[in-house]
Amino acid sequence: MSTALRHNAGHYAGICAACAGLLLALWAGTAGADTLKPRWEWGMGIAAATLRDYPGSRNYRTYALPFPWFVYRSDRLYLGREGSHGVLWRSIDSELDVSLSLNPSVHQQSNPERAGMPVLDSTLGIGLRERITFWRDESSGLRLSAHLPLRVVYALHHGALAPVGLQVQPGLSLDHNLAGAWTWGIGTAISFADARYNDYFYGVEPAYATAARPAYTAPGGFAGWQLSSRISYQHQHHSVSVFARIEGLEGAGFADSPLVSTPHAGTLGVAWSYRIGTSKEMVPGNEH
């Protein structure tokens, strides 16, 4: 395969990764774990989002993609709109599972901050996540949880996975099943990453240094914070979700990188889906 074709394949994989990442954010928490849900269900939908190329970049891109979706629920495996994870251990208020994260590729042609630099390939994070519920109120549908994901991140480079580094992102979330078919949630998290991961996004090798972009090696450590919120509405076979997130890099070890143009960024997304078919068997929801 030619270099151009490999780059185009990586670019389209990045678009799919961005939309997949959006769907994870939009549908996370839209169904309570204590309600009965079909064993499986499937349908179609469309999602759109405006995303920054990477935290610290001033460059934004808008993604839109129609998609099929499929949900399967069991005691040990969840496949569906909130992502895919296998449960390794579970108690009433705690769960350890395997989870994934996705990020799109960034081409120097579309990002002035990285002009003349190599492509940032799409990345895939694979790791473990511990979720602990500290407090819940069954009468109001409120639940406060902590999350601790630890992921090994790989870049999709010319059709192969190349290791990028380690990332951990502890956080808190407050979920609320509102009256009727409405659900709402808010979450906050802080990020830490090793030097290899940060240097992948924020390092500048001497060969690509310019007068306005000096050579730079990013350290490991604190990598910023984020605050997100979402609201979803489901009526019969239709559901609509809106998601917003703000991010900050104050105090990050790489905040002085020449590739950091702004310490703040925002993300906004919306998705609509239609449920076409479901199983007759009902099981406890285990999205969480």
Image (cartoon, helix red, strand yellow):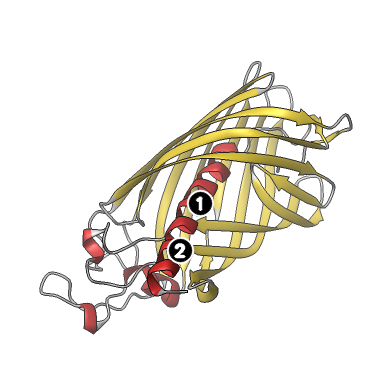
Residues tagged 1 and 2 counted as in contact (Cβ below 8 A): no
Identify residue for label 1.
16
Vertical arrangement, residue 177 with respect to residue 98, above or below? above
Vertical arrangement, residue 231 with respect to residue 80, above or below? above
Q: Position of residue 206 (x, y in %)?
A: 23, 83
Vertical arrangement, residue 80 with respect to residue 115, above or below? above
Report the quarter where the C terminus lies. top right
* Nearest to N terminus: mark 1 or mark 2: 2
Three-letter residue code for mark 2: Gly
Residue placed furthest toward the front:
1
Q: Position of residue 32 (x, y in %)?
A: 71, 33
**Element type where label 2 sits in the image:** helix
Q: Position of residue 155 (x, y in %)?
A: 49, 70
* Real-space Cα separation, disc 1 to disc 2, in angstroms: 10 Å
Residue placed furthest toward the bottom:
206
47 sits left or right of 288 in the view: left
Three-letter residue code for mark 1: Cys
* Residue at the image point whose x is 81% and y is 32% from the top: 38
Considering depth in this image, is 183 or 186 the residue closer to the camera? 183
* Residue at the image point whose x is 50% and y is 69% from the top: 156
Asked whether residue 28 appears in the rendered view, the answer is: no
Residue placed furthest toward the left:
211
* Residue at the image point whose x is 22% and y is 66% from the top: 115
* Residue at the image point whose x is 27% and y is 51% from the top: 59
Vertical arrangement, residue 44 with respect to residue 173, above or below? above
Asked whether residue 93 appears in the rendered view, the answer is: yes
Picture quadrant of residue 56: bottom left
Identify residue for label 2.
10
**Element type where label 1 sits in the image:** helix
Considering depth in this image, is 96 or 155 the residue closer to the camera? 155
206 sits left or right of 44 in the view: left
